[in-house]
Image (cartoon, rainbow, N blue to C red):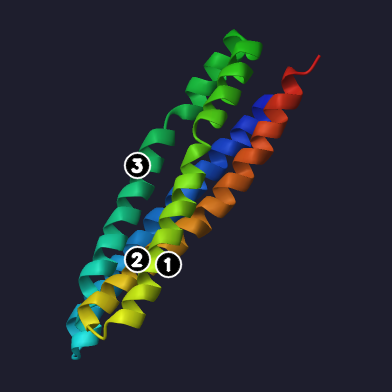
């Protein structure tokens, strides 16, 4: 049971790193949108501004939210662990189980966005609609990439928690 808190710390470090990466990615997307706004002369280029700005804002907000949520967790988790290790592991196991549905949601959203983008490109030649399609694909692809690593970390952590509870 003693080794489990090391895995909890690894989990928290991964969440912190993910928050930093998502925030930086969102900010870089916003900077790219600003550059696009200042330099794009075609309707097609300008049509990407709003969808990509929205993606950048969502990912920046998500990353900052992750950083704020995880800021004080290490000390809080350490205290809970020291107070009652078995209860801590049980609560952590339940917490990890409780957010697994989010990975399904991100896959469904990405799938719907990808299909919508394909339909948009097949059914219209409007740069505005195609810009939104590209924005949706960008959003879905980045979401899948982020959740790919998050889900693998979560499953690994869950295995450690499950093993820690075995007699």
Q: Where is residue 105 drawn, in percent x and y? A: 45, 46
Disc 2 packing (10 Å; few <14; some 14–19; many ≥20): many
CA separation, marks 3 and 1?
26 Å
Name the disc covering residue 136, or none.
2
| Residue named by callout 3 | 65
Which of disc 1 and disc 3 is earlier in sequence?
3
Residue occupying image coordinates x 65% and y 39% = 155
Disc 3 packing (10 Å; few <14; some 14–19; many ≥20): some
Q: Quadrant of residue 68?
A: top left
Residue occupying image coordinates x 42% and y 67% = 114
Residue ranking furthest to the top: 83
Where is 31 relative to 159, above or below?
below
Where is 112 relative to 14, above or below?
below
Name the disc covering residue 114, or none.
1
Where is 66 relative to 120, above or below?
above
Residue occupying image coordinates x 32% and y 75% = 120
Which of disc 1 and disc 2 is earlier in sequence?
1
Disc 1 packing (10 Å; few <14; some 14–19; many ≥20): many
Between 143 and 130, which is closer to the camera in this rendering?
130
Q: Where is residue 2 drawn, in percent x and y? A: 73, 20
Is residue 13 toward the left or the right of residue 25 in the image? right
């Amino acid at each position: 049971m003693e080794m489990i808190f090391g895995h909890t710390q690894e989990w928290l470090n991964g969440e912190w790193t993910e928050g930093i990466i998502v925030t930086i990615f969102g900010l870089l997307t916003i900077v790219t949108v600003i550059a696009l706004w200042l330099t794009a002369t075609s309707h097609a280029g300008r049509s990407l501004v709003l969808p990509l700005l929205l993606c950048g804002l969502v990912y920046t907000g998500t990353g900052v939210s992750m950083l704020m949520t995880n800021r004080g967790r290490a000390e809080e988790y350490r205290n809970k662990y020291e107070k009652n290790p078995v209860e801590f592991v049980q609560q952590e196991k339940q917490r990890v189980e409780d957010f697994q549905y989010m990975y399904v949601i991100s896959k469904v959203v990405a799938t719907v966005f990808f299909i919508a983008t394909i339909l948009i490109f097949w059914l219209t030649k409007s740069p505005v609609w195609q810009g939104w399609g590209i924005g949706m694909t960008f959003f879905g692809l980045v979401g899948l990439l982020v959740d790919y690593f998050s889900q693998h970390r979560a499953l690994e952590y869950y295995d450690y928690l499950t093993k820690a509870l075995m007699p």
